[in-house]
Amino acid sequence: MRNLFALSVLSLCAVFAGCHGSHHGGGDPGKLWLTDVVIDEDNVVTATVHLPEYHYGLLYLDGSTTATAIVIADGEIVLGEFELGDYSLCLELFLSPDGAALLSDPRRRFPLFADHTGEQECCDFSVYPYDGEPDPDPTPDPDPTPDPEAPSLSCSVNSDGAVLITLHNIDVSVSVSRSSTGEEPVLIDELDVDEFGGSLDGVVIVDLGLEAGVYTFTIEGEDVSLSCDDLVILDDEDNNDDDNDDRVRYLICHNGHGLLLPKHAAQYHLDNHAEDSFGSCDN
């Protein structure tokens, strides 16, 4: 069974002044790479990144060792909806394999660009209640009746590589199946709602022993059809028939922390950092 490890990066203390994001944007002209953080009226945070030539970056929040995103091109990165509070977002840079090849080319007498590997740039921002247009009719309806919670389904992969399928607010008996691209669905289980007290709420099914790839899990019952996708990831250099499959990530140990990277980035680390190795840092 392959282990799934969180995409982790080395947490370094940021020494840069924060750029203060807001509901109307927070660009800081002093920033070179992490140039703006914007929060919309739904508290969805978007970061604007301009990478130096021949580099990629890792974004992470509040000094966490778990990266929020891998950035391989300039543009806006949507980080999702945030709770109210103060945050710090940092971008850490790494030299790409193409950049490493150019800098090491003995035919070039002078470097065309600088290597910014390990350098960070950070933005501080706050998410606060949106101060938009006032509600023209702020008086609530008398004794409003809350809408019943809709049935839903969620999937996740735990640290042992097992897929957890969790059912919520389902009041009918259902079947649960799994499928992958080009394959017929495989029945995982059939659940009788009466066995769970009349509601499949918080019931969890665990699917084990899957090869790397994307899987779709579907539940079907009377007036209910829901599905979700999840990804099982390789954690070593074996069993990859398609080196260009961008769904596949490789686990390496870098500076005492695990990194899950695309193959070209993982190979660059192994070729250029003598202390890096494939697999978990616990090995």
Image (tube, rainbow, N blue to C red):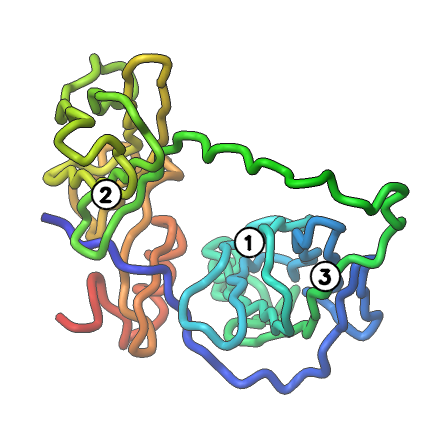
Going from N to C along the chain, the mark reached first, 3 or 1, is 3
Residue 30 is labelled as none
Q: Nearer the viewer, mark 2 or mark 1?
A: 2
Going from N to C along the chain, the mark reached first, 2 or 1, is 1
Helix or strand or loop: what does disc 2 sit on? strand
Q: Which one is nearer the viewer's eye here, 31 or 271? A: 31
Residue 110 makes an appearance in the image:
no
Question: Could you tell me how far apart the alpha carbons at marks 2 and 1 are, in whole angstroms?
Answer: 28 Å
Name the residue tied to disc 1: 71
Q: Amino acid at mark 2?
A: Leu
- Up-down relation of residue 31 to residue 226 (above or below): below
Seen at 72% across and 83% down, the residue is: 17
Q: Position of residue 256 (x, y in %)?
A: 29, 78
Location of the C terminus by quadrant is bottom left
- Up-down relation of residue 174 to residue 130 (above or below): above
Helix or strand or loop: what does disc 1 sit on? strand
User: Within 10 Å of the Cα at label 2, are there few (<14), some (14-19), or many (20+) other Cα atoms?
Assistant: some
Q: Which one is nearer the viewer's eye here, 141 or 234? A: 141
Seen at 22% across and 38% down, the residue is: 212
Seen at 10% across and 39% down, the residue is: 209
Name the residue tied to disc 2: 164
Name the residue tied to disc 3: 37
Q: Position of residue 121 (x, y in %)?
A: 64, 74
User: Within 10 Å of the Cα at label 1, are there few (<14), some (14-19), or many (20+) other Cα atoms?
Assistant: many
Residue 248 falls left or right of residue 41: left
Question: Could you tell me how far apart the alpha carbons at marks 3 and 1 are, in whole angstroms?
Answer: 15 Å
Q: Position of residue 127 (x, y in %)?
A: 69, 65
Contact, mark 3 vs mark 1 (Cβ under 8 Å): no
Residue 245's image quarter?
Answer: top left
